[in-house]
Amino acid sequence: MYISEYPRGSEWRKWDLHVHTPFSYLNNQFGNDFDRYVKELFKKAIEKEVAVIGITDYFCIEGYKKIKNEYLKNDEKLEKLFSEDEVKIIKKIRIFPNIEFRLNKLVGSNRVNFHVVFSDEVLISDIEENFLHELDFVYGGNTFDVDEKWKLKINNLKDFGNKLIKEQPELGSNGLFVGMKCAVVDDSQIMDVLSSKKSKFLDKYLIIVPSDEDLSRISWKSQDHNVRKAIIQKSNCLFASNPNTIKWALGKFNDSKVEYIKEFKSLKACIWGSDSHSYESLFEPFNKRYTWIKADPTFEGLRQIIYEPEDRVKIQEEKPEQKEPYNLIDYVQFDDSKGMFTNKEILLNQNLNVIIGGKSTGKSILLREIARAISPIEVSRRLKDANLEDYKVYENDEKLTDEFIVKWVDGREDKRSNENRDYRKIIYIPQSYLNRLAEKEGEQSPVDELVSDILKNDNNVKLYFEDLNNEIGLINRKISHEIENLFENIRRSHVVEEDMKNLGDKEGINTYIKEIETEIKELQSKGGLNDKDIKNMKN
């Protein structure tokens, strides 16, 4: 059976992919004591709980090569510098080679930097011989002829620097320093070499471009900015911690992500590092903007940020998605003398856990045993409520294993055999449970109640439900009041209607008026009254 090196699955870990070594000649503040450098590097990494380090140098991998070959592969050397416990932790820290190039391109007055981070599975010899030594830098120009180009090798850079010092002594006295300071390479050639050697490098490198300014405020229409755009288009991610740049790189300033991808080829994850050149700055990025990546500490884990740049990366001081330890299970374990189940600890993730396997491989049993060890009352209630066959097995107290253990992150241990204990709140959903509940009749389905219980485990959701219920209560009371008013108005309308009926209808009243008017005229005629007399009587 395959057992992963990281059986708990993807977790938030601290990564720093931009840490220089004493071989970064352009700005070395570490000195030349490499033993001290390695000791400080890993002790600080342990202290800061850094899981992955990008060992960075200009134009080379000398620092990475020395750490890998002379220290990590040399147990005797490690034991002289570190304690036994420290060595165990160091062996778990992943290091990747990060090569920082200076390109033959300018944006304004600034030279563009360009990082290639390789997988630790790529051989050092392949990085040097099949990549670095395939790249050219301009050694000198020629009149009416092509430029003289030399291969990117340490000795060639040193010779190049010494040549420049002879021509311009004010440049300095260290040939390698001057050579690295003045050498530039072409990003197109970098991409060509990497792409042409797929058997060596396919899916085993990432291109990272530094940019901690606010890219959301830049116009990409000028000549300099289009040079920068071409570089960003080639990149997989950015070295940036500016909040607006992070949003910009995720396409959030565009009308759509499709529009951003059309222009810049892909969404870009933003990561950040300490860019350490001194012991004081090791793993100490500005404003404590640490990079947290949710992945296994492997190069394949790093590559996941290409596909999920927003969900996999956070730049902040505190670890993301921290949860209360009393709500998290560390591991579960069968105690089985019959050999039906493994006795190894089954580690759980603090987020979603998925158990896969064929039919009758024990998935339902594992779930039931976890719930049974935590809260047998919950298990009994759910199985009985749905009238599942497992209920009979549970009631008969049939035990497939000797014991089952649930270990919580806060140190508490629940066992199936424990009695008279406080039960932590869980919701157990057995196999076929939802189907059985859905088949039950009733205005409020048991499924509705179950979903409501699950949602209310979140305090924010619980408060929302309470506010909603209060609002519903107010509305119901208002409806009752309005219904009472309606019936009162209906009663009053009936009274008015009866009164109107007693008064008679309009046609009958008009006929009656006409009859009276006719009778008045007849009386006037009989009494011998003329119109003048009638008028005087009315006045």
Image (spheres, helix red, strand yellow):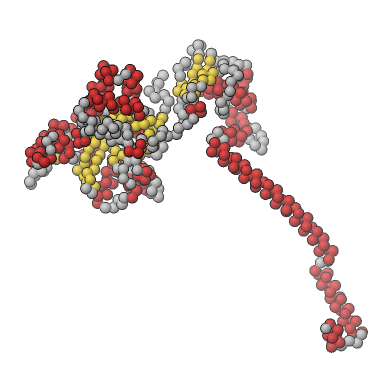
Q: Residue at x 55, y 23 (%)?
A: 374
Q: Position of residue 1 (x, y in %)?
A: 41, 19
Give residue 283's quadrant in the image: top left
Query: Residue lying farthest right?
Result: 526
Q: Which residue is rendered at x = 51% and y = 22% of the image?
A: 412
Q: Quadrant of residue 282?
A: top left
Q: In the drawing, does residue 294 fall left or right of residue 515?
A: left
Whether residue 325 is visible, yes or no, is yes
Please identify the quadrant where the C terminus is shown: bottom right
Residue that appears at 25% across and 34% down: 277
Question: What percent of the width, then of the height, locates residue 358?
Answer: 48, 23
Q: Quadrant of residue 184?
A: top left
Query: Would residue 150 be visible to someone looking at this image?
Result: no
* Residue situated furthest front in the rendering: 280
Q: Is residue 469 above or below residue 374?
A: below
Name which residue lies at 59% across and 15% down.
398
Q: Position of residue 373 (x, y in %)?
A: 55, 20
Viewer-closest of 269 and 508? 269
Q: Is residue 410 or residue 191 the one in the foreground?
A: 410
